Image (tube, rainbow, N blue to C red):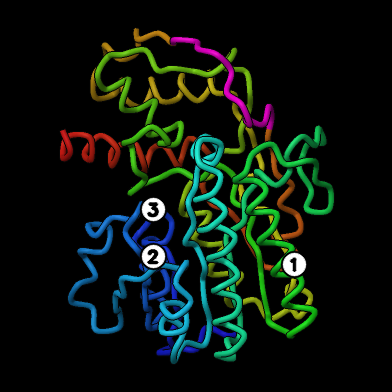
């Protein structure tokens, strides 16, 4: 694969948090981009700045609809498949919808790509596939039992992608994202990710709720790193990449309590009183993995992935956006 200018790339879920950043990056590299999103979790405002870009088009569609998928891939040479229903707790509360979107929708996209002769499909997997494996750091070839319906659907995505690669020679590259955060991440709703949830609480001088003791650790990954990995996967020329999955993270970990301390420090630059806000511990959450840390060596070797943002640098970029967004939606 090469970064041939003016070729069309379909981005499913392109109105979402990561997807909208991917659209920006691909357009900046000279690609034409078609975004398909059903706007269930994506936001139109994430794409407002692209409304007059003649190399960008938006298609409202649902990956659960095979006809929508077929129409979306028409004329494209590659697909970046990011559309999914995220959140471990949401999948536990409603396994059937998570299965229909994340697994049934994924299979629709594989079929659409196969029949359209798509050159490469880059798709989002998740660190949740590691399940109860205690090994640290997490390596792509060692996984445990999934701990949630969401994790099962992502493991299923990888299995189907490998199958289509072997049966139909479809060029697939999977990316196991680790706790991505950054601008445009939705801070609202019961299934909001930890960082925007913590920031919303701290801005209101409320103690952020932490499930369990707060010593569980995560490899928090700034969205700029995730986007770099997508572009690398799309343009990788090494044939050994095909049919593979790769960890996408920074390669370091922090506990939730350390994360909250870092957020207090950043937000304290705007409001010193935030530095005094405490933490509320609540019951541990079903399906949560205790510790997560990625080995990103495989992605470095085969994709040329070289993440630029550790947690601190990512927060320095993201926190001002979270604060502004909080004011916008208040």
Report the residue marked by disc 2. 14
Residues shaded magenta: 280-291
Quadrant in the picture for residue 179: top right
Q: Main secondary structure of the magenta part?
A: loop
Taking depth in this image into account, of 96 and 26 the one nearest to the observer is 96
Can residue 310 be seen here? no
Q: Label 2, secondary structure: give it.
A: loop
Residue drawn at the location 73% of the way across and 68% of the way down: 302
Alpha carbons under labels 2 and 3: distance apart: 8 Å
* Residue 202 in the figure: left or right of residue 144: left
Quadrant in the picture for residue 239: bottom right
Report the residue marked by disc 3. 17
All told, the count of numbered labels is 3
Quadrant in the picture for residue 181: top left
Residue drawn at the location 74% of the way across and 85% of the way down: 169
Residue drawn at the location 59% of the way across and 24% of the way down: 255
Taking depth in this image into account, of 179 and 287 the one nearest to the observer is 287
Q: Label 1, secondary structure: give it.
A: strand
User: Residue 207's x, y, as percent?
Assistant: 37, 12
Alpha carbons under labels 3 and 1: distance apart: 24 Å
Report the residue marked by disc 1. 244
């Amino acid at each position: 694969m090469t970064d041939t200018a003016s070729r069309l790339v379909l981005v499913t879920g392109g109105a979402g948090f990561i997807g909208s950043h991917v659209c920006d990056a691909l357009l900046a590299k000279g690609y034409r981009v078609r975004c398909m999103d059903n706007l269930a979790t994506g936001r139109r405002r994430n794409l407002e700045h692209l409304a007059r870009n003649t190399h960008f088009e938006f298609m409202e569609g649902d990956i659960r609809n095979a006809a929508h998928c077929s129409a979306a891939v028409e004329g494209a040479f590659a697909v970046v498949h990011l559309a999914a229903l995220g959140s471990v707790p949401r999948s536990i509360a409603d396994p059937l919808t998570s299965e229909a979107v994340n697994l049934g929708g994924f299979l629709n996209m594989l079929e659409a790509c196969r029949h359209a002769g798509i050159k490469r499909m880059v798709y989002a997997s998740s660190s949740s596939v590691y399940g109860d494996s205690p090994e640290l750091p997490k390596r792509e070839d060692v996984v445990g039992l999934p701990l949630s319906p969401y994790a099962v659907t992502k493991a299923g995505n990888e299995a189907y992608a490998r199958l289509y690669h072997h049966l139909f020679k479809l060029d697939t590259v999977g990316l196991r994202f680790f706790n991505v955060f950054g601008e445009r991440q939705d801070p609202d709703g019961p299934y909001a990710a930890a960082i925007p949830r913590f920031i919303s609480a701290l801005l209101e001088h409320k103690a952020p709720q932490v499930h369990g003791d707060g010593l569980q650790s995560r490899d928090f990954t700034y969205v700029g790193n995730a986007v770099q990995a997508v572009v690398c996967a799309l343009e990788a020329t090494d044939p050994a990449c095909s049919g593979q999955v790769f960890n996408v993270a920074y390669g370091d970990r922090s506990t939730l309590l350390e994360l909250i301390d870092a957020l207090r420090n950043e937000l304290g630059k705007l409001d010193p009183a935030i530095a005094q806000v405490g933490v509320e511990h609540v019951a541990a959450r079903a399906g949560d993995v205790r510790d997560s840390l990625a080995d990103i060596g495989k992605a470095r070797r085969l994709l040329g992935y070289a993440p630029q943002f550790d947690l601190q640098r990512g927060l320095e970029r993201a926190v001002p956006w979270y604060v502004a967004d909080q004011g916008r939606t208040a």
